[in-house]
Amino acid sequence: MTRVQVDGVPPDDRFGRWTALLAESIMPMTVDSEYADRFTGRVTSLQQGRTDLMMFASLPLSGERTLTHIRRADSEAYFLGMVHGSPIGLEQRRNNAFLQAGDMALFDTRNPLAYAFQDQGRQSRLTLIRLPRSAVPLPDRRTNALLGTRLPTGSATGALLTSYLSGLRANASRCGDEELLRLGAVGFDLVSAFLAAQTDSPAVLSAETRHQVLLARVLVHIDHQLADPELGPVSIAERHHISVRLLHQLFRRQPRSVSATIRWRRLERTRADLRDPRLRHRTIGEIAFRQGFRHPADFSRAFRAAYGLPPSEYRRTAPDPTPTLHPDSDPTQAP
């Protein structure tokens, strides 16, 4: 994982540095912004084997890639983008798309391109997956018809892909290199199946990939619902429209069962809160309650069993943490 931000660069050099970064990570183009004199932006890049994933957050800007740019350099790549914040207008191959949060579109490096983020007074956020053109198992003529269009995400594959991208954006900081490579293989299969569905081309999403993506969705759901005392196998299965039996099968190769995972994540989140100096005014009981522990005695026993000392002693002796990201944080946003 690589993180780059231009906020620490002298103001006069920031926008030039950002333009160079876009040229290196995506493709050369002409870029402009009303905020060029006070620009801020950051990108987190994940190398995932056949795919690279980039998570951008910056002040609004616009860009254009011309035939001159293409003649100078063409990396022969497709990019699938998902919008998370301000809308973006996109044009390629005489197609136009207006993309809002949750929308996806495909563009490539071979054709002229124009785009502009709508200025809503806040940072624009975008996730891009880079796909080498030679690796996409679809006919060029059919894939090219999708360029610059808003791709519908209402299908099962579209829902899986949007969940995958949102979940990875939220949890990338917690993944090791090997896990990122495994997730990259899942992402490539999902993107291939998603694009195939748009072109009516045959592509099969393996059962293993479906299970891995479903597991990723379940883990994100657990992190978001820890405060709910009813969170458990039954509620999780109902939320994801699967049987409890299938849910337990998803966790067979995980280090913990469903219920044990919920308890462990609650403990880890509570432990982090006990070390947070911003929460010194809250009692231990209040902190535990916020993370789903409804009985103080049960919480104290579980905490001591997991970490070897009672929560009060841990809070008194633990050093203040260096800033970390919660599982639902956006790694491209400033802390």
Image (tube, helix red, strand yellow):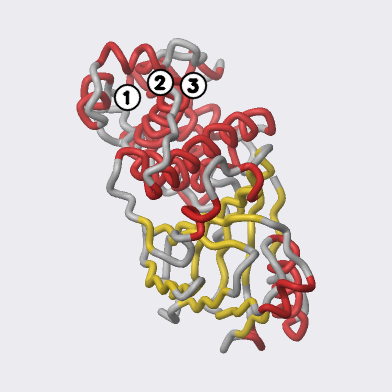
Can residue 118 be seen in this snapshot?
yes
User: In the figure, 282 relative to 218: above or below?
Assistant: below
Apparent side of residue 57 relative to residue 151 in the rendered image (left or right) = right
- Do callouts 2 and 1 mark residues in contact (Cβ within 8 Å)? yes
Label 1 sits on a secondary structure element that is helix
Name the residue rendered at 37%, 12% in the picture.
249
Circle 1: residue type: Pro
Circle 3: residue type: Pro
For label 2, the residue is 300
- Do callouts 3 and 2 mark residues in contact (Cβ within 8 Å)? yes
Choose between 303 and 234: the one closer to the eye.
234
Q: Residues within 10 Å of mark 2 (few under 14, many from 20)?
A: some
Tell me residue 293's x, y (percent): 32, 28
Cα–Cα span, label 3 and label 1? 12 Å
Cα–Cα span, label 3 and label 2? 6 Å
Tell me residue 172's x, y (percent): 57, 42
Residue 30: quadrant of the picture: bottom right
Circle 2: residue type: Ser
Q: Residue 296 carries which label?
A: 1
